[in-house]
Amino acid sequence: MHIDFTQLSANAIYFNVIQTLVPRPIAWVLSENENQSFNLAPFSYFNAVSSNPPLLMISVGKKPDGSHKDTRVNIEKRRDFVVHIPHEGLLNEMNDSSATLPAGVSELDKLGLETTEMVGSRLPRIEKARIAFACECYEIHEIGSTPQSMILGRIKSLYIDDSVANLDAKNRLKVDTAKLQPVARLGASEYMTAGTVITKGRPS
């Protein structure tokens, strides 16, 4: 099967990409609303960009009415945000947090999620999350005809739950993926969790 993107609508292109660019890590992003409550939303157009400076990227679309999503507005205005890597035990809450709510209404309150201090950020993190990145807005680029907001966040600090972290033989950080149980995005309404971990050395 060959699919010519030049002959497809934007919606059809999106559907084909999310079915094939898999699995995608999920950024579960906490940001601060105008009324000082917290917004929480998942994004699967997300990944690392650079190590020097340490940057990650999330791509944020628009609301059905064409206005910017709360995450984009909050990050642009208040700069700080926290990106969590959701695990299997938080799948339902993460999925439910994607629902569109009125501006200023907190998903954390709706879902009953507890927060705790995030070292390196004035914002908290989700207490049950096993990995969280404290970020500040580095740049925002508007891309394409919609447009999408490509948000680059500079990582200021990283939280890793001690239960999933070890040191390897070279005294480097080693995260136990089986214990972390990260959730990844597939197409449509499908997700996947960590499967078999295959270890390979670098080619000689």
Image (spheres, rainbow, N blue to C red):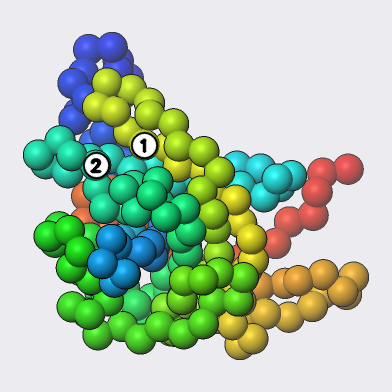
Disc 1 to disc 2, C-alpha distance: 9 Å
**Compared with residue 67, is residue 120 higher up or lower down, i.e. above or below?**
below
Name the image quarter holding residue 171. bottom right
Q: Amino acid at mark 1?
A: Ser
Relative horizontal placement of residue 99, taking residue 1 as reference (left or right): left
Element at badge 2?
loop
Q: Residues within 10 Å of mark 2 (few under 14, many from 20)?
A: some
- Quadrant containing the C terminus in the rendered view: top right
Whether residue 182 appears in this view of the structure is no
Front residue of 99 and 117: 117
Q: How many marks?
A: 2
Q: Tell me residue 132's x, y (percent).
A: 53, 69
Q: Dot 1 corresponds to which residue?
A: 149
- Which residue, as the protein is rendered here, is positioned at the far top? 6
- Which residue, as the protein is rendered here, is positioned at the far front? 35
Q: Residues within 10 Å of mark 1 (few under 14, many from 20)?
A: some
- Identified at 29% across, 71% down, the residue is 37
Element at badge 1?
strand
Q: Tell me residue 189's x, y (percent).
A: 21, 56
Sequence-wise, which precedes: disc 1 or disc 2? 2
Relative horizontal placement of residue 130, taking residue 159 as reference (left or right): left
Q: Tell me residue 10's x, y (percent).
A: 22, 25
Name the mark on residue 97: none
Q: Amino acid at mark 2?
A: His
Whether residue 156 appears in this view of the structure is yes
**Compared with residue 160, is residue 56 higher up or lower down, i.e. above or below?**
above
Cβ atoms at labels 1 and 2 below 8 Å apart:
yes
Q: Dot 2 corresponds to which residue?
A: 68
- Identified at 61% across, 56% down, the residue is 155
Q: Tell me residue 116's x, y (percent).
A: 46, 85
- Quadrant containing the N terminus in the rendered view: top left
